[in-house]
Image: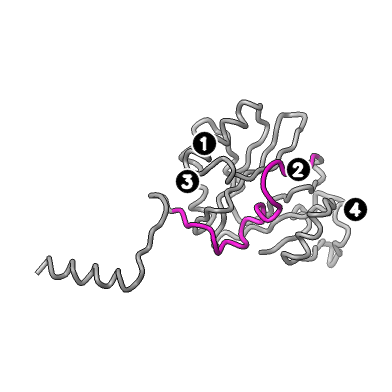
């Protein structure tokens, strides 16, 4: 997992990311590991930290909702809970109140998918009312809790869940893989070999 300070290097001032350095006219920012990131977020320091999402690695299920009413927020939560068949307590989310409505970042840390493209296609199945912003499912930055950026001054405060629940591509060892057809169930290798052998006998 990679964390960096604001990916919009040309649209924010140096003040927005204190440790950025300018080289050959371009700003570069330091990367932080899990421990450093958690320490910053637990203290609710605003350092414009963004998660650097990678396109081709596993990711927990997450979603983004912008400019929503209270009714739309509840609708979005219900869609995720119903589609992924989870208990409401398994849904983690942050919330920010903006001049244009409510903004939410939601995640299901107990469920992962193989990559961002698969997750995008799954979210599109429940996005019939355009509640979810599907443009976030690409390689790039995703704002973390308690962080701002120049164009988004309202912080996302955690309403349910832990800080780790919003580091979408780390600590996924215990998460269950979700495929487009539902949860994946892989029989042990020995059982699989026996099943294939029995199938071969039946075909003879």
The residue at which mark 3 appears reads as 122
The residues tagged by marks 1 and 2 sit, at their Cα atoms, a distance apart of: 22 Å
The residues tagged by marks 2 and 3 sit, at their Cα atoms, a distance apart of: 26 Å
Q: On screen, 19 above or below 147?
A: below
Instruction: Give SS at disc 1.
Output: helix
Residue located 69% across and 63% down the image:
2
User: How many numbered dots are placed on residues in this image?
Assistant: 4
Q: Residue 152's image quarter?
A: top right
Residue projecting furthest to the right: 15
Packing grade of label 4 (10 A; few <14, some 14-19, many >=20) is few
The residue at which mark 1 appears reads as 79
Instruction: Indicate yes or no whether the magenta region holds residue 156.
Output: yes
Could you tell whether 49 is left or right of 16 in the image?
left
Instruction: Give SS at disc 2.
Output: strand
The residues tagged by marks 1 and 4 sit, at their Cα atoms, a distance apart of: 39 Å
Between disc 2 and disc 3, whose residue precedes?
3
Mark nearer the viewer, 2 or 4: 2
Location of the C terminus (image quadrant): bottom left
Residue located 73% across and 61% down the image:
3
Between disc 1 and disc 2, whose residue precedes?
1
Residue 157, which numbered label? 2
Could you tell whether 127 is left or right of 64 in the image?
left
The residue at which mark 4 appears reads as 15
Q: Residue 76's image quarter?
A: top right
Image location (x, y in percent) of residue 59 = 56, 57
């Amino acid at each position: 997992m990679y964390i960096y300070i604001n990916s919009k290097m040309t649209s924010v001032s140096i003040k927005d990311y204190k440790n950025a350095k300018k080289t050959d006219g371009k700003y570069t920012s330091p990367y932080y590991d899990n421990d450093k990131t958690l320490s910053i977020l637990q203290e609710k320091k605003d350092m414009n930290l963004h998660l650097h999402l990678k396109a081709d690695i596993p990711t927990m299920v997450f979603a983004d909702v912008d400019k929503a009413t209270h009714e739309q927020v509840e609708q979005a939560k219900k869609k995720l809970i119903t589609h992924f068949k989870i208990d409401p307590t398994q849904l983690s989310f942050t919330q920010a109140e903006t001049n244009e409505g409510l903004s939410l970042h939601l995640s299901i840390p107990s469920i992962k998918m193989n990559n961002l493209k698969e997750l995008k296609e799954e979210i599109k199945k429940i996005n019939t009312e355009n509640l979810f912003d599907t443009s976030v499912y690409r390689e790039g930055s995703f704002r973390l809790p308690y962080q701002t950026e120049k164009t988004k001054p309202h912080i996302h405060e955690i309403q349910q869940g832990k800080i780790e629940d919003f580091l979408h591509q780390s600590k996924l060892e215990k998460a269950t893989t979700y495929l487009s057809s539902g949860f994946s169930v892989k029989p042990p290798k020995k059982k699989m070999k026996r099943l294939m052998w029995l199938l071969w006998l039946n075909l003879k």
